[in-house]
Amino acid sequence: MINKGQKVYVHCTAGIGRSTAIVLVYLCIYKKCDCWEKPDEVNKWVKSFRSVSAPNMSAVKAVVEENSEF
């Protein structure tokens, strides 16, 4: 469990696809950020921090849609 105020480092080998996809899904499903219904908008926000990120957006959208009731 992540306590409020703590930082988490998420990575995969290159830090481009898998880690970004996990972060996007987490933000969309659990954090309900302002534009959580639009994974593409969340991806733009994440890219402002990690410009080389290139997650599989089809997979991200599928997971978010399937779990949107959380």
Image (tube, rainbow, N blue to C red):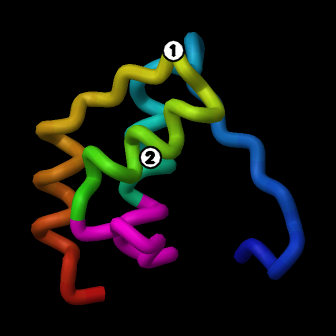
Instruction: Place residue 58 in its image quadrant.
Output: top left
Residue with the mark numbered 2: 22
Q: Which stretch is magenta?
A: 26-37
**Residue at horizontal 39 percent and vertical 52 percent from the top:** 42
Give the percent coordinates (x, y) of residue 47: 51, 31
Point out the frontmost of discs 1 and 2.
1
Give the percent coordinates (x, y) of residue 45: 49, 45
In the rendered structure, the answer to whether residue 7 lies left or right of residue 45 reads: right
**Residue at horizontal 12 percent and vertical 69 percent from the top:** 66
Give the percent coordinates (x, y) of residue 29: 36, 72
Rate crowding at label 2 as few (under 14), some (14 to 19) or many (20 or more) other CA atoms within 10 Å. some
In the rendered structure, the answer to whether residue 35 lies left or right of residue 10 reads: left
Instruction: Place residue 49 in its image quadrant.
Output: top right
Instruction: Place residue 50 in its image quadrant.
Output: top right
Residue with the mark numbered 1: 52
**In terms of secondary structure, where does tag 1 sit?**
loop
